[in-house]
Amino acid sequence: MKTKLSLLACASILSSQLCLAQTTEQVNDWKPCPSNQAGKQYPQYNSEGRVKFRIAAPEAKSVGCTFRDSSEFKKGEDGAWYGYTRPLDEGFHYYAIKIDGAEVPDPNSHYFYGSSRWGSAVEIPAKDADFYALKNVPHGQLREIYYWAKSSNTNRHAFVYTPPDYDKDTSKRYPVLYLQHGGGEDETGWGRQGHAGLIMDNLIAESKAKPFIIVMENGGGIGGLRRTNAPTAAGGPTNTAPAGGPGGRPFNFSAFEKVLINDTIPFIDANFRTLADQPHRAMAGLSMGGMQTRTITLAHLDKFSHIGVFSGGSIAVTNITDMAAFKEKVKLVFISYGSGELGTNRAGGRGFGGDPKANTAALKETGVNAVFYESPNTAHEWQSWRRSLREFAPLLFKN
Amino acid sequence: MKTKLSLLACASILSSQLCLAQTTEQVNDWKPCPSNQAGKQYPQYNSEGRVKFRIAAPEAKSVGCTFRDSSEFKKGEDGAWYGYTRPLDEGFHYYAIKIDGAEVPDPNSHYFYGSSRWGSAVEIPAKDADFYALKNVPHGQLREIYYWAKSSNTNRHAFVYTPPDYDKDTSKRYPVLYLQHGGGEDETGWGRQGHAGLIMDNLIAESKAKPFIIVMENGGGIGGLRRTNAPTAAGGPTNTAPAGGPGGRPFNFSAFEKVLINDTIPFIDANFRTLADQPHRAMAGLSMGGMQTRTITLAHLDKFSHIGVFSGGSIAVTNITDMAAFKEKVKLVFISYGSGELGTNRAGGRGFGGDPKANTAALKETGVNAVFYESPNTAHEWQSWRRSLREFAPLLFKN
């Protein structure tokens, strides 16, 4: 059982119960989290970024949560179990509740797909939460679509964001961004926990970004998440990410690449009013989706002009075989990370292809329009990626 | 603790464990439920309609579920807990798992909004499941929308189904069905567990229904679910359902009625290519949504021409003040129930306004186009309502 360091320190001089109270209730400004189900008072957050849980489990022997360094849950005066996390980064975090060894969703939270399961997550309102707040501005639509893909021989399920005026002037055509989720996530991620629609609605309302269509497909489940059995691979840009991805084995994105290039893009261009050419097509993604973006765009520069990689590696000068052609075709390379991923060069250390900031600076030196963004005080998590979209979108399709 | 009758009966002659085995494993054709999260082997169903659960809770004292008459969960050889329901109606059922007194979602199932919470549900494939199966046919879109409502002074969240060819010919305009969920449910119900989109896609592909738009709003949460404090009410058709609704107190639908009439319909007519007149506007709903439909359409016959009430009461001849005007304006009154709600006149007994079958027959006698549908072998549950939509949709907007 994990215990907070602060708890251990004071346990030597005080009763652990008193110590727990001191440690966890010193900032007593708890409010219900916005990620709660309607009417639920718990979980709560405070201004330190701690989360306080309340679980009714009258006959349980032990209750806890999956956040590391969280306090042991204790029974309160009302008979329910209460527990606290350490201070967390502002933003969005997946978790589960543990009851006598069972890992289950918190019955108080909304549910999200991440960590390869539908389950709980908690939102700690960020200081800059306004950019994805629901406001009284014109709203686009998040459209759930099904279509048949020959490449996978299956029905595909995806989401398409259309901007606010899409249905007003039906002669107008729009650029398209293909926007991918991370490993263990799916096509629901960007629309749900990513707030992609609200981010775009607000940017467009403030004239900070041009209106464009966003397509959110599922990059896992057809090979994208399953790694090749080979312990190493040559790692050409077409089919594999750089060796040394999570788990030490390369991802294999070829199945997803085939669907995206041969089915998704043609379907979208046939069924939405797109500007169906390379100058008006972008791809971006987070973590695994960033690796997919890097792999797929570099192999298909005839199809994509704008590239966004969020917490998923970078593009080094040495990755580009024909720099003249690259510069002619690629109008933007956008690389981003949460500051917490960079502090000790962890991103490079995790095998995402070297120091992303240095790689991006070197790319810029050669004359490529390369932009690096660092999300302050966040790590490998959705607040970094919401901000990345906010920074990336205004740079798209400027000409 | 509840115990199955069959279990009690044989417990007198056999050990309860052997008996449990006999009772629950006699039809050993278990398959994973389609409502499971991807890759999850449990819950399972068998051809009797029983559901078998598996919950890993190593240190729990007791595990169970909220289905009445379900077996006590027991630890299997692998250390996980196993339990069984009685035979259930085919279709969709909400439930929760109980672990040492805590009621939590099953970590293996998808989550749905019903019983006033996001939580688990299990789908037992119905013999007629084909009509809402995902097929390789042209698909419409389920669009998530936000809009500002002056009546409630809030942003509203709704879903809009647009038929497959909606974006092909942008000069074509479509009729609209306003389709409401039940009590303790919300705007996600019809699109998610109701499969409204797939039902329409399949009907349209077989030329069994005309294409139309479906709008799914939230009829609770702004007064629709909160009952008036008055123990009884006069029960005029405008603001209240018949006295004697669930709980014994009348619903108050006036807040939802205002939003629907003054905000939702104008927003939809301004932002979708609708045929924005009474002959091309229908309303239907299930349970509480059926009561709302009855109340709101009878008060606004200038706005609605087609009326559908699924497991939510009926329209008696005595409810109609001006029969000549009603016959001129109303092209269809569709009333439906699950057979399990009718067997002992339970629907009438529950205060939904008398015998719905007799009321509908009497209405038909007066010359109204009144149709009654009885869903075989289902009760007050989604399989009844999916079938009701399948039967109702082909009757809409025929002229």
Image (spheres, coloured by chain):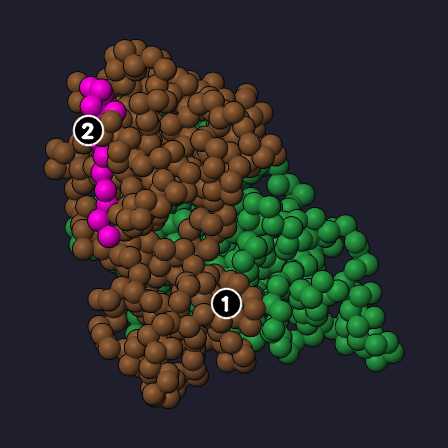
Chain colours: A brown, B green
Residue at 27% x, 18% y is: A330
Instruction: Name the foreground residue: B337 vs A79.
Output: A79
What residue is shown with label 1? A98
Image quadrant where one finds the N terminus of chain B: bottom right
Q: Which residues are magenta?
A: A363-377
Quarter location, residue B10 = bottom right
Q: State the image quarter where residue A392 is shown.
A: top left
**In the depicted view, which residue is nearer to us: A24 or B273?**
A24
Q: Which mark is residue A395?
A: 2
Judged left or right of residue A230, residue B213 is left
Q: Position of residue B175 (x, y in %)?
A: 35, 32
Taking the spot 17% from the left edge, 18% from the top edge, the residue there is: A399
Whether callout 2 and callout 1 share a subunit is answered yes
Residue B387 in which image quadrant: top right
Left or right of residue A252: residue A389: left
Please give the chain letter of the residue carrying mark 1: A
A360 sits left or right of B207 in the view: left
Q: Whole-percent x and y of residue A295?
A: 42, 26
Q: Residue B7, position in %: x, y?
A: 77, 72
